[in-house]
Image (spheres, rainbow, N blue to C red):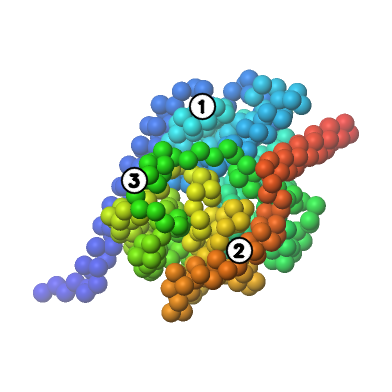
């Protein structure tokens, strides 16, 4: 009789699972290559491209919102660069995902170029006219573009926050970092060694200057549903590591929304677009909370494309450690923060979570009680806005972004001239 090892079935199962994953990955890559082959030639870097500035984006469709929020500020910058004589199309976008390229072509007039391979990236990044490249996240693929020495590389991020990613040592890889305000500058200076202040430019959040329009769905909702103070509930996603696990909807989302609705508040519910990417229970939580919201006459499920009009229409916000909280400061209205449920989530001492009324998983106080405290502390919101965003008067943040971008382009042009004059 032959005795097989007891672990053989488990080994076989693991091997089969690995083989299945490999097949799925191969099929996915094949589909991606097919999409790439079908892209028109206009998506490839062109000999006629004379971009002075560009946005680099290597993410997929689930994170393209990070770039989309910068399109309007880029449009304002492009108008200024045209005034300065930098040609008809001084700004372009380079992406590494074919689906993202096709999507962006539908939402912006900026020239969109695609290249998964180094050859195409070389053509784009080594263009003689290119002086500045902007990055909207900390994606590891950014470093494939950072190796090109001629343009200045500028980190923008996709919102101000006190997440641990905002003080990553990766920031040193960029020539410049556009910070929102003094808080970000202080945060970076305290966390990073050798990060010179002259590499940081405070620009606020220029997106907040973009003209805002209220969705007709919300206008209709206000007319046909019961009245009440409107709460903007915008929980963040679960994060990709314990240190970044700031999202709490899977633990308290139903309780928060139910409490608000029962207290007579209107609720504008807007989950983060990446919720559930890493953990199924967060995806399920969004579905469950959405069901509660849609079943209540005071609940409104926000399907609008961005965070903008909510700052005008909502009376207060309940949010987690996310850029929405910091954008909300510009509204001057009450803000309630929700502390992370995950003990390993890294929280900055003395940050916004310590300066605002909070829903704490370790406390018995519910969200309605915390709102009462927030209502009594609205005077501090303006001070926080100045500290985190700087001057938020109409047009000021966009003006700072344009001035800072001009300075980067001017500096790199002068450095380029001096280098090649030697």
SS category of the residue bearing label 2: loop
User: Does the rendering let one see residue 55?
Assistant: no
**Of the image marks 1 and 3, the number of the one nearer the N terminus:** 1
Tell me if label 2 and label 1 are in contact, CB under 8 Å.
Answer: no
Q: Is residue 388 left or right of residue 140?
A: right
Q: Which residue is mark 1?
A: 43
Residue shown at 63%/36% (left/top)? 74
* Residue 324 sits in quarter: bottom right
Label at residue 14: none
Who's the residue at 37% across and 41% down the image?
220
Q: Nearer the viewer, residue 230 or 65?
A: 230
Residue occupied by mark 2: 378
**Where does the image place residue 256, in percent across and percent down from the top left?**
39, 66
Q: Earlier in the sequence, mark 3 or mark 2?
A: 3
Mark drawn on residue 224: 3
Q: Residue furthest right?
A: 422
Give the x, y percent position of residue 260.
39, 64
Tell me if residue 379 comes above or below residue 90 in the rendering: below
Quadrant location of the N terminus in the rendered image: bottom left
């Amino acid at each position: 009789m032959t005795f097989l090892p007891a672990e053989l079935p488990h080994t076989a199962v693991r091997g089969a699972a690995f083989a299945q994953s490999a097949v799925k990955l191969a099929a996915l890559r094949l589909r991606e290559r097919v999409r790439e082959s079908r892209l028109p030639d206009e998506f490839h870097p062109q000999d006629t491209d004379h971009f002075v500035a560009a946005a680099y984006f290597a993410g997929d469709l689930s994170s393209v919102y990070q770039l989309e929020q910068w399109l309007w500020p880029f449009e304002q910058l492009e108008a200024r660069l045209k005034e300065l004589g930098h040609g008809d199309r001084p700004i372009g976008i380079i992406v590494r995902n074919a689906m993202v390229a096709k999507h962006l072509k539908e939402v912006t007039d900026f020239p969109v170029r695609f290249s998964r391979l180094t050859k195409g990236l070389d053509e784009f990044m080594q263009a003689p006219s290119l002086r500045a490249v902007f990055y909207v996240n900390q994606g590891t693929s950014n470093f494939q573009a950072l190796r090109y020495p001629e343009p200045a590389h500028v980190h923008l991020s996709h919102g101000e926050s006190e997440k641990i990613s905002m003080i990553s040592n990766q920031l040193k890889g960029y020539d410049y970092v556009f910070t929102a305000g003094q808080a970000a500058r202080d945060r970076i200076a305290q966390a990073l060694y050798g990060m010179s202040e002259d590499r940081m430019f405070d620009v606020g959040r220029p997106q907040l200057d973009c003209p805002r329009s209220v969705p007709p769905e919300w206008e209709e909702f206000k007319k046909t549903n019961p009245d009440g103070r409107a709460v903007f509930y915008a929980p963040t996603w679960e994060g990709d590591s314990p240190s970044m696990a700031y999202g709490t909807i899977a633990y308290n989302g139903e309780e928060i929304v139910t409490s608000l609705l029962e207290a007579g508040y209107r609720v504008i519910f807007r989950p983060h677009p990446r919720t559930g990417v890493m953990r199924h229970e967060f995806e399920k939580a969004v579905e469950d909370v959405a069901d509660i919201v849609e079943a209540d006459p005071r609940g409104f499920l926000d399907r609008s494309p961005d965070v903008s009009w909510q700052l005008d229409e909502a009376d207060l916000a309940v949010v987690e450690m996310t850029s929405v909280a910091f954008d909300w400061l510009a509204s001057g209205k009450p803000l309630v923060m929700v502390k992370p449920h995950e003990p390993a989530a890294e929280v900055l001492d003395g940050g916004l979570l310590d300066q605002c009324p909070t829903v704490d998983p370790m406390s018995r106080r519910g969200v309605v009680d915390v709102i009462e405290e927030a209502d009594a502390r609205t005077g501090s919101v303006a001070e926080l806005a100045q500290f985190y965003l700087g001057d938020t008067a109409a047009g000021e943040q966009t003006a700072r972004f344009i001035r800072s971008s001009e300075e980067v382009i001017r500096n790199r042009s002068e450095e380029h001239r001096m280098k090649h004059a030697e």
